[in-house]
């Protein structure tokens, strides 16, 4: 495709005295430090830009590299008088959709780069220069960059050649200094001419302008090195690169920064705006919490412990390379979530606030899918145009009509949600299948302080359960592992008084007991709803069973709705946000701060860190913040994040994030060395667990093989200084309130390391997928999964009891979220359940990361991992067609697909991304 022909010499303009110097490191300029070599002088460096396209060469004269293949790669370097000619191919990505001003600016940059130095490249050898005691270096300002044709219009490849001495050795790093006025996105640099093979320097990073930061960027080759194996020529650079990422813990972070540091959750409230929006700091002994990425904003005026907020649409700082790429921005930030949070929801509020009423009948809910909601948009301005474009892209309908897809849970059977069987099925195969546990015996006892919360014994007694099991004794049911419980009592009761004091909120702390029938059905048989004790009553616990008369039937529906509301809140605040998003953030920060990008564990974890810091920052800005969507739409309201903190304090353990350990701890599996993963499920038809164990085992096998490849020597784990610092920092700085807990795994052996890494990758991939991408498919139909309840269940002495008798449908619907609340949360759930077109899925490698590692054995191991995931996908498909597995198949039953590895873009209810990217 590209041919090179002899060019005339292009004389260097910085012979002997460079016009500009690279930044200083520790007081010494890198440029001067690396160019004062006795073996090579900048004055002897020839700088030439070699550009050709469509087999038409730019002509000239001089010695040139020969033997190029059809793809333009160099078969070998050609020796010349002063050394070897080397070709560098630099790949840059520009914006896909440029404004006119940006296009003009881009063309101007291209024009100007032909006359003056804009980008300086330094090749750093892996070999040491005995004079400078640093890596040998060659440097040049690249001139006359002209793009070559590319398959993608937004991908530009530039070529430049320069000469290196014959004893230079292999380059291990490239230093880049950007003298342009703005940053650019560097995909990779490929160097041709060394040892007859291309050398890859994968970057996928923003290169800041020297106007913003005088430091050069360091890009390492795709070769892995443990710290002790680092070639002498790049050992100092390895350390410098890590130090540059850590920062000094001071000052406010700027947009171009790549600084990773820790902070507490002190940015959720906005007391300067309104004292009602003040929120406590999470991340101290009273309210422990994982740490977030530090932004360094000034404190609020009214509370020095709280950080001032950045409100939408202004971005919250995350390290530059953590921000969404353009495709993701178009799908989420710019295209969907920004329009949703900035424009759509206010329009919904304007439409419905004057009559924020409950759904009057079930047909009102059906209209959201069949007819849509007409929005007020009287002002024809830029916001209106943005909304119109967004609505056409998102829903395919007109600008003032908000119309939703029918959620999967009612798409095949609109009445499925009413049945007890479906209620039980979703505990095992729904969006929150991680709280059910075995019921080990009676009495069921609370761990809360009885002096504050009343008698600890549950009102669900052995005798009451026996009445619901006419054909089996309770003892036998327990012995055969047929009784299970969903217990939110202790987690929610301490907050119930505050929650119920909020306007339009009424909730209970719930316990639900299930019986697993011989026909394979998980059936709810008793629900306990509790309120805090009062002066007039020390026991405020009510037990509901299904019953057989009409009134009891409707009350049972209300009781189940309250359980679903509890479940929705715990799912969102604890299992989804805390146990995946929040807990993953310190792992990511520590990985960047302590592991070099050359470290094999960094390379293993890198795909599983993509976009997580950015999505978490957006969540702090608009979802979990004071007055945000979660507080508005879920029962806990302003106490939401305090509940999350309490759950972290009482429940979270790193070792229990391992799927087999979690299942065993809940009694949903027993140890069995003969089974894959060493566990046997108590309920075979437990789709989340059964499919999850397949994914877990595949990840575990891949990680173990990878770790074995790099840590085959005795003591190689304990002697890895970066790795040990990484693990210590995760505990000491990422989870400081829990750093002394005995359950933290040791990191002494390759088995220890494999176990730790498998947990992290599982949490980022399979666990998050199972908990996230079913939000709209299950929660998009409000009666199936209400996020809050507005009324308590009336008893016979309550005035509302008569209303229940006269119009049970209205009594039920008026207890659910209002039309405004429901429409808001549906819009958010739909967005959060969406796969971006640039999603990177487990077992797949993006074309931008095709050169992620220079190790054929590792690539073979990864191919085996990918093949195993394809096999697992076929196994899951077959399971979903197995009529014996009633939680996956049957009349109106949607298949369980949340752990199918692959997916298309959109709301698909399937697919496992590599990382927590939404």
Image (cartoon, rainbow, N blue to C red):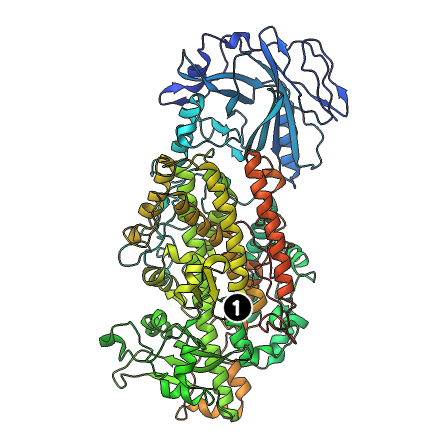
x then y, percent, for residue 253:
41, 40
Q: Can you say which quadrant of the picture contains the N terminus?
A: top right
- From this view, report whether residue 223 is shown above or below residue 3: below
- Residue 324 visible in the picture: yes
Please name the residue shown 46% across and 20% down the image.
Answer: 22
Residue located beneath label 1 in the image:
686
x then y, percent, for residue 914:
54, 49
- From this view, report whether residue 376 is shown above or below residue 701: below
Q: Nearer the viewer, residue 118 or 455?
A: 455
- From this view, report whether residue 656 is shown above or below residue 145: below
- Apparent side of residue 389 relative to residue 744 in the rendered image (left or right): right
Badge 1 density bin: few <14, some 14–19, many ≥20, Cα 10 Å = many
Secondary structure of the residue carrying numbered label 1: loop
Q: Nearer the viewer, residue 299 or 438?
A: 438
Q: Nearer the viewer, residue 656 or 565?
A: 656
- Residue 852 visible in the picture: no
x then y, percent, for residue 9:
65, 9
Q: Nearer the viewer, residue 700 or 911?
A: 700
- Apparent side of residue 515 relative to residue 912 in the rendered image (left or right): left
Quarter of the figure with residue 579: bottom left
Please name the residue shown 57% across and 52% down the image.
Answer: 332
- Apparent side of residue 266 relative to residue 699 in the rendered image (left or right): left
Which residue is at the far front?
674
x then y, percent, for residue 260:
40, 40
């Amino acid at each position: 495709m590209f041919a090179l022909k002899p060019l005339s010499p292009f004389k260097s303009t910085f012979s002997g005295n460079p016009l500009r110097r690279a930044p200083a490191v520790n007081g010494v300029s890198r440029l001067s430090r690396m160019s004062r070599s006795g073996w090579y002088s900048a004055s002897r460096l020839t700088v030439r830009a070699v550009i050709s396209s469509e087999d038409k060469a730019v002509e000239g004269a001089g010695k040139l590299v020969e033997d190029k293949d059809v793809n333009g790669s160099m078969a070998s370097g050609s020796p010349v008088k002063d050394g070897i000619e080397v070709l560098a191919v630099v790949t840059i990505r520009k914006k896909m959709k440029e404004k006119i001003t940006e296009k003009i600016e881009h063309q101007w940059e291209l024009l100007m780069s032909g006359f003056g130095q804009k980008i300086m490249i330094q090749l750093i050898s892996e070999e040491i220069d005995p004079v400078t005691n640093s890596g040998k270096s060659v440097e040049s300002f690249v001139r006359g960059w002209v793009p070559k044709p590319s398959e993608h219009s937004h991908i530009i490849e530039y070529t430049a050649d320069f000469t290196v001495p014959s004893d230079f050795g292999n380059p291990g790093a490239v230093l880049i200094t950007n003298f342009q006025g703005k940053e650019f996105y560097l995909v990779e640099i490929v160097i041709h001419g060394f040892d007859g093979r291309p050398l890859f320097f994968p970057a996928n990073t923003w290169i800041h302008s020297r106007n913003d930061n005088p430091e050069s960027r360091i890009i390492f080759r795709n070769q892995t090195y443990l710290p002790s194996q680092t070639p002498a020529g790049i050992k100092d650079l390895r350390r410098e690169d890590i130090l540059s990422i850590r920062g000094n813990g001071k000052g406010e972070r700027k947009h171009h920064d790549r600084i990773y540091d820790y902070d507490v959750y002190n940015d959720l409230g906005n007391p300067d705006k309104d004292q009602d929006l003040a929120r406590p700091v999470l991340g101290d002994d009273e309210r422990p919490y994982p740490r977030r990425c530090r932004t360094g904003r000034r404190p609020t005026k009214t509370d020095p412990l709280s950080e001032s907020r950045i409100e939408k649409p202004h971005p919250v700082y995350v390290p530059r390379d953590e921000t969404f790429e353009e495709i993701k921005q178009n799908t989420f930030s710019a295209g969907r979530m920004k329009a949703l949070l900035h424009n759509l929801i206010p329009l919904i509020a304007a439409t419905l606030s004057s009559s924020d009423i409950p759904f009057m009948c079930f047909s009102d809910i059906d209209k959201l899918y069949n007819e849509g909601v007409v929005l007020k948009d009287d002002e024809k301005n830029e916001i209106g145009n943005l909304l119109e474009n967004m609505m056409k892209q998102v829903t395919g309908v007109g600008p003032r009509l908000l119309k939703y897809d029918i959620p999967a849970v009612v798409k095949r059977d609109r009445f499925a949600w009413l049945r007890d069987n479906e209620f039980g099925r979703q505990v095992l195969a729904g969006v929150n299948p991680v709280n059910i546990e075995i019921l080990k015996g009676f009495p069921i006892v609370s761990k809360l302080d009885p002096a504050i919360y009343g008698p600890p014994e549950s009102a669900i007694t052995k005798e009451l359960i026996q009445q619901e099991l006419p054909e089996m004794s309770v003892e036998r049911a327990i012995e055969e592992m047929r009784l299970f419980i969903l217990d939110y009592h202790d987690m929610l009761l301490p907050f119930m008084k505050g929650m119920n004091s909020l306007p339009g909120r009424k909730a209970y702390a719930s316990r639900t007991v299930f019986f697993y029938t011989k026909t394979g059905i998980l059936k709810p048989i008793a629900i306990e709803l509790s309120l805090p004790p009062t002066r007039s009553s020390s026991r405020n616990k009510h037990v509901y069973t299904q019953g057989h008369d009409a009134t009891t039937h409707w009350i049972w529906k209300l009781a189940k709705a309250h359980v679903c509301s509890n479940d929705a809140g715990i799912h969102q605040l604890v299992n989804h946000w805390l146990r995946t998003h929040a807990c993953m953030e310190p792992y990511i920060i520590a990985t960047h701060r302590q592991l070099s990008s050359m470290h094999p564990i960094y390379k293993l974890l890198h795909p599983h860190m993509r976009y997580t810091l950015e999505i978490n920052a957006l969540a702090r800005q608009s979802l979990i913040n004071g007055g945000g969507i979660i507080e508005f739409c879920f029962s806990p309201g302003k106490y939401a994040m305090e509940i999350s903190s309490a759950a972290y304090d009482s429940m979270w353990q790193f070792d229990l994030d391992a799927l087999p350990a979690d299942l065993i701890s809940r009694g949903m599996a027993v140890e069995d060395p003969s089974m894959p993963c060493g566990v046997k499920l108590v309920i075979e038809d437990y789709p989340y667990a059964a499919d999850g164990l397949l994914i877990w085992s595949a990840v575990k096998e891949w990680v173990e093989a990878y770790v074995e490849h790099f840590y085959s020597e005795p003591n190689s784990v304990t002697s890895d200084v970066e790795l040990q610092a990484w693990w210590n920092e995760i505990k000491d700085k990422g989870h400081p309130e829990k750093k002394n807990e005995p359950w933290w795994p040791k990191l002494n052996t390759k088995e220890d390391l494999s176990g730790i890494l498998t947990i992290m990758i599982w949490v980022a991939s399979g666990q998050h997928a199972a908990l996230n991408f079913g939000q709209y498919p299950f929660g998009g139909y409000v009666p199936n999964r209400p996020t809050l309840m507005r009324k308590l269940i009336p008893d016979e002495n309550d005035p509302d009891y008569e209303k229940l008798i006269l119009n049970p449908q209205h009594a039920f619907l008026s207890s659910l979220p209002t039309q405004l609340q429901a429409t808001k949360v549906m819009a958010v759930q739909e967005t959060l359940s969406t796969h971006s077109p640039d999603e990177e899925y487990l077992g797949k490698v993006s074309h931008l990361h095709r050169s992620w590692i220079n190790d054929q054995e590792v690539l073979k191991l990864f191919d085996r991992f990918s093949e195993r995931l394809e096999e697992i996908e076929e196994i899951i498909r077959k399971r979903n067609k197995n009529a014996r597995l009633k939680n996956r198949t049957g009349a109106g039953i949607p298949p369980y697909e949340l752990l199918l590895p692959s997916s298309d873009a959109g709301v698909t209810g399937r697919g496992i991304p590599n990382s927590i990217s939404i």
